[in-house]
Amino acid sequence: MLADIDDPRPSRARGFLIGAAIAVPLGLVFWWFASQWLPKLILGNAVEYDVRLRQEDAYMQAVCASPQLPRDESLCKCVLAMEYPSLDCRLPFLHWSLERQVEVCADEATFNQSLKFCSCVRALDEKLQTLAPDTKEARQTVQNYAGCTELDDALFLPAVDQLGGS
């Protein structure tokens, strides 16, 4: 303490000003990003997701308007019982979609056109054939179909009028 009297500590003002000169611009950039871009990013993704779910609702309702038994039976049991089938019938819809895409990818020209997607679909179908239905592993395999749909050469589901008979 006596040494501080003879040799006082240097002022902290210089360090404070340097820290403020660095932190204030970074804080302003973060605040600008958080207030301008982050809400748009979150809401934009939510809006896109909601639009996709409404499209899936409409597709499922159209399929179940004139179902082809037994192909559509498990899907339509759920769809016709729920108000929002895209949310409540997710797993049956993914399973139904996987089966339709297996049928589409059976054509060699289509398989060659969408090689990654069709390979993914075939691999999931082969794995699903080895599993007992209504098991945790089967449900996880069906849920993995969503990853196939994100591939760059993914195919859309067939139009309802193209589904035809079973």
Image (tube, rainbow, N blue to C red):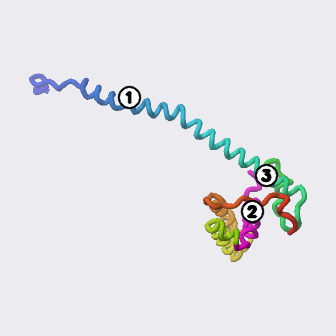
Q: Quadrant of the C terminus?
A: bottom right
Q: Amino acid at mark 1?
A: Val
Relative horizontal placement of residue 102, taking residue 147 as reference (left or right)? right
Instruction: Please tell me how crowded label 3 is: few (under 14), some (14-19), or many (20+) other residues with Cα within 10 Å.
Output: many
Q: Quadrant of residue 118?
A: bottom right
Q: Amino acid at mark 3?
A: Pro
Residue at 12% x, 22% y: name it. 5
Q: Establish if 65 lies above or below 71.
A: above
Labels 3 and 1 touching (C-beta < 8 A): no
Q: Quadrant of residue 62?
A: bottom right
In terms of depth relative to the viewer, which is nearer, 161 or 99? 161
The verdict on residue 156 being magenta is: no
* Secondary structure category for the residue under label 2: helix
Q: Amino acid at mark 2?
A: Ser
Task: Give the percent coordinates (x, y) of residue 151.
Answer: 61, 60
Instruction: Kindly report the secondary structure that dominates the magenta region of the rendered protein.
Output: helix
> Which labelled disc corresponds to residue 97?
2
Residue at 61% x, 59% y: name it. 152
The verdict on residue 90 being magenta is: yes
Q: Which residue is mark 1?
A: 24
> Marks 2 and 3, Cα distance to the nearest angstrom?
14 Å
Q: Which residue is mark 3?
A: 85
> Marks 1 and 2, Cα distance to the nearest angstrom?
52 Å
Task: Give the percent coordinates (x, y) of residue 99.
Answer: 75, 67
Give the magenta-colored segment's residue range: 86-108
* Secondary structure category for the residue under label 1: helix
In terms of depth relative to the viewer, which is nearer, 13 or 31? 31
> Which labelled disc corresponds to residue 149?
none
The answer to whether one can see residue 52 in this image is yes
